[in-house]
Image: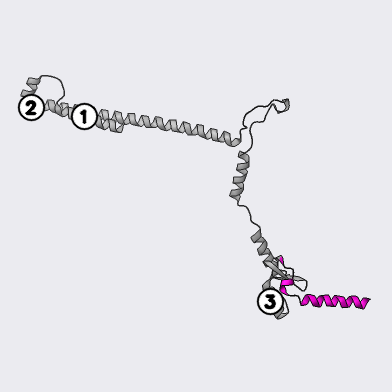
Amino acid sequence: MFHLEVFVTEIDSTITCFRTDDELDYEEGLCDNCGEECQTLHPVDEVKLCYVCRMYYKLMRKHRPCNYTSAISEFRQRKVRKCPEDMKDIANDFAEMSKYLEVNEYENEGVQVVQSPKTKCHEETKSVMKELTRVRSKAIRLECALKAQRADGLLSGLDCYRYLVSKEDHHRRDEDGPSRRDRVRGSHTWTEEERIIAFHCECCISFYI
């Protein structure tokens, strides 16, 4: 009986050796020799080898020399993806912003309050909008003050110019005497030259304001 079992075992091993590659059960994983990840592992002498290590073993009748430990370590480093620190901060901030601020006080009293719960993000957004409105109002006030200051500067410049022109006219009249035109008109209305100058100054003020 013992000899029969040994004979059957030898026959099974012989049949396994003569099985084709298509009849073998391939697996996916790491090579037991080099540690490389592959889609197809070939079982050879109770070990699972990749295609390169299998061909080397079939030709040389020994395993292909390689550093299995370093290959496994490199593979694990490639597989393990570490989350960057900035992404962790973003995720933590997102989780913090999604927390609800208000708790339903009437939950245990059987009273239902129809109101959407407010999160921390909602409160932060409201605060930012208030600050933005305040800054916009300040910018508008500064712009109005700047326009008024610019208009005052133009008007003061016009007054100075009018004073200098009037002074020069008086000086010219004192030297040449009153002209016939001044004697005939005898009014205090503006001359044509003054009207043109005033018109141009008014256009400049309207443009800057």
For marks 2 and 1, the one nearer the N-term is 2
Q: Is residue 154 visible?
A: yes
Q: Residue furthest right?
A: 1
Which numbered mark, 3 or 1, is in the foreground of this view? 3
Instruction: Tell which circle, 2 or 3, labels the residue nearer the N-terminal end.
Output: 3
Q: Measure the C-alpha gap from mark 2 to mark 1.
A: 29 Å
Q: Which mark is residue 55?
A: 3
User: Of 64 and 15, which appears nearest the observer?
Assistant: 15
Q: Amino acid at mark 3?
A: Met
* Residue type marked 2: Glu
User: Which of pointers 3 and 1 lies earlier in the amino acid sequence?
Assistant: 3
Residue visible at 25% across and 31% down in the picture: 203
In the rendered image, the quadrant that contains the N terminus is bottom right
Provide the residue span drawn in magenta.
1-27
Task: Tell me if 22 is positioned left or right of 175 in this view.
Answer: right
Instruction: Give the residue type at disc 1.
Output: Phe
The residue lying at 69 percent from left, 68 percent from top is 40
Relative to residue 144, is residue 91 depicted above or below?
below
How far apart are the two marked residues, 2 and 3, measured between alpha carbons? 122 Å
Give the crowd class for mark 2: few <14, some 14-19, many >=20 residues within 10 Å. Answer: few
Q: Which mark is residue 175?
A: 2
Q: How many marks?
A: 3
Q: Residue under circle 1?
A: 199
